[in-house]
Amino acid sequence: MSAPPGPAPWPFAALRAYRRDPLGYLEAAAAEHGGLVHFRMAHRHVYLLNHPDPVEHVLVRQAQRYRKGITYAQLRRVIGQGLLGAEGELWRAQRRLSQPFFGRRSLAQTVGGMALEAEAAVARLRAAGAAGPVELYEAMAETTLRVVGRCLLGVDAEPIVQSLRGCMQHLVPFALQQLTALVPPPPWLPTPTNRRFKRALATLDGIVNTLIEAPRVAAADAPPTLLEALLEARDDPAAATMTSRQVRDELVSNLLAGHETTASALSWTLFELARRPELTAEVRAEVARVAGDAPLTAERVAELDLTRRVIQESLRLNPPTWVYTRHTVEADQIGAHTLRADAIVLLCQWTTHRNPAVWPDPLRFDPARFLPEQVAARPTFSYFPFGGGQHQCIGRDFALLELTVLVAELVRRLELTLVDEAAVQPFPGISLTPRDGIWARVAPRAGD
């Protein structure tokens, strides 16, 4: 057995190259060395997975040999032991509690709320567009945060939108610095970055307390919410894992993970459509055929096949979670290669989704890739925008439903024209966001 192939073992050169251009470094490593790559980053051994077979090995076949990796260790300073960061029995207990709110029946009940927030987003974009170009990513982040508030927590997110987005401007750069620094400063050291982080975290905790005390969105027939379930479990002596701190951690996980990655997916999908007027016209025609001018319902959304495939293809090329980590609990073997214990494993959607051995002409945007017969012909883990295995994102179906509702409503009501397509570049932060935003001219559709 041997180590997987990889770049020359100059650990600090690899770290510098990765910090300078993460996507470019991983793309080059995958192109030169294949589906399983080994390199050194400072003192750590790192394995990069770019092919469905090793990805499935780590997430499913030998999942017991791996645990959540360094990314989650840093995120826990923000999200605590919420479902996103938890492991073991605590993770299982939280998953059981949350699962009913992401099932098919519960999701169908959220479509009305999603449609209302989509209509409100159209109105905000129209008003903003009358004054000049609009930055779509931040506009979509506001929208997806409102959807989480209404549909999962049963609250009006209006009072927290600006303060939460302000928190993100400090929390995300801090997490990135911790992940890529050779020697991160200890949290107790009063550096400017640590002080900004602590202030942002205190603001975030204040937001969570506001949500817990906020009045619920009124409706006699409103479905139960995740927040209500968390608070009931907190007050139930039999639910030993649900403390007040755990309620806080679960709310933070849902607020941050539930809106940031969806905003990324939504803005990239709008970008891909805006640069393809003919495809936009096809999506618009599908929405008109299915719904006309009527409100979107769960039944109508289920018929939006092309719209859904456009979203899936955007998630392939622009995966919001572009890489995530596992940690080897013990040594393992993948094919002819050995992976060391105590090493970092990078499961990379960015490179796997663009692997030419799996995806012909991988940089071409083609929603037909997600026709049923094409999906069936590919390995399962050629595409994993929401992760996989037992830790697959619990909010996957909620996010896909939300994206379909929002894309359909925005496309049928608005005309989006990019200001400068070439200026839109991906930034590989905690999620894949547009580096300098996506600026577009926004106008109502003729006759709307």
Image (cartoon, grey):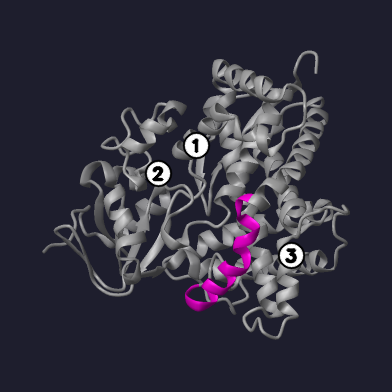
For image coordinates 76% across by 42% down, the residue present is 112
Q: Which quadrant would residue 114 be assigned to in this image? A: top right
Q: Nearer the viewer, residue 34 or 59?
A: 59
Vertical arrangement, residue 349 with respect to residue 194, above or below = above
Q: CA distance from mark 1 to mark 2?
A: 9 Å
For image coordinates 31% across by 73% down, the residue present is 342
Magenta segment, which residues? 87-104
The picture places residue 164, in percent across and down from the top left corner, at: 73, 57
Q: Quadrant of the N terminus?
A: bottom left
Q: Mark 3 belongs to which amino acid?
A: Leu
Instruction: Specify the principal SS of the magenta part.
Output: helix
Q: Which quadrant would residue 209 be assigned to in this image? A: bottom right
Vertical arrangement, residue 207 with respect to residue 102, above or below = below
Q: Mark 1 belongs to which amino acid?
A: Gln
> Do the CB atoms of the residues marked 3 and 1 lie less than 8 Å apart?
no
For label 3, count other residues whose C-alpha is less than 10 Å away and answer few (under 14), some (14-19) or many (20+). many
What residue is pinned by disc 3?
Answer: 227
- The answer to whether residue 66 of the structure is visible from this angle is yes
> Do the CB atoms of the residues marked 1 and 2 lie less than 8 Å apart?
yes
Mark found first going from the N terminus, 3 or 2? 3
The picture places residue 25, in percent across and down from the top left corner, at: 34, 47
Q: Dot 2 lies on which element?
A: loop
What residue is pinned by disc 1?
Answer: 312
In the rendered image, residue 100 lying in the magenta stretch gets the answer yes
Q: Nearer the viewer, residue 338 or 113?
A: 113
Left or right position of 86 against 168? left
Q: Nearer the viewer, residue 376 or 415?
A: 376
- Please tell me the numbered disc located at residue 383: 2
For image coordinates 56% across by 36% down, the residue present is 268
- The answer to whether residue 21 of the structure is visible from this angle is no
